[in-house]
Amino acid sequence: MKNVRITVKRIACYPDLIEAYENPIEHACSMREGQVFTANGGQRPEGFCESAWETVSPFVRALAHGAENFYDGWMKDPRSAMISCNDGFRPVSFLLEATDGDAD
C-alpha cells in the first residue's frame, strides 16, 4: 500500500452565500493553502479536517491501493486526483498524489 500526499491547493470563500444562508460560525476551517499532509496507507492524517476527509477518503484509499486513471484520463498524472471538500461556503481544493513510498 502507498502513502498519499494531500496538498491544499486552493481555498475559496463565498461571502454572499455565507451572509444569506450560514449561521455564524466561530471557526469554520483551519486549512491553509500550501499545507501538506501524508495519508499513511489511506489513514486520515493528524490535523486533517474530519468533514473534508469524508469527501476525499475514497480517492485517498483508492490511490493508496494502487488505483490509477480516475474517470478515463481526467488528470494529467494518472496517480492523482483533484478533490474539493463539501463545504459550499468555503470549499477547499486538495491535490491527492500517490507517492512512491510504501505506507508504514
Image: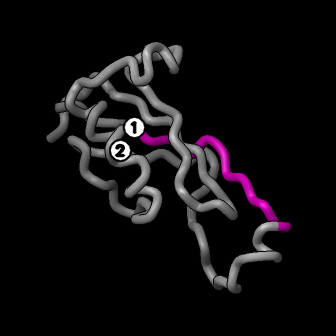
Query: How far across and down, in percent of the image, does residue 56 sit?
Result: 41, 47
| Gap in angstroms between the C-alphas marked 1 and 2 | 5 Å
x 47%, y 16%: residue: 77
Relative vertical location of residue 56 with respect to residue 101 in this rendering, above or below? below
Image quadrant in which the N terminus is located = top left
- Which mark, residue 65? none
x 70%, y 85%: residue: 24
Give, as a three-letter code, the residue at label 2: Thr
Q: From which residue to which does the magenta span run?
A: 6-16
Residue 103 drawn in magenta = no
Q: Front-most of 26 and 22?
A: 22
Q: Which residue is mark 2?
A: 38
Secondary element under disc 2, as helix, strand or loop, is strand
Query: How far across and down, in percent of the image, does residue 99 sit?
Result: 33, 27
Q: Front-most of 72 and 9?
A: 72
Quadrant hosting residue 60:
top left
Image quadrant in which the C terminus is located = top left
Residue 7 drawn in magenta = yes
x 44%, y 64%: residue: 51
Query: How far across and down, in percent of the image, does residue 103 sit?
Result: 18, 37
In the image, taking residue 36 as reference, residue 5 lies left or right, namely left
Q: Which residue is mark 1?
A: 5
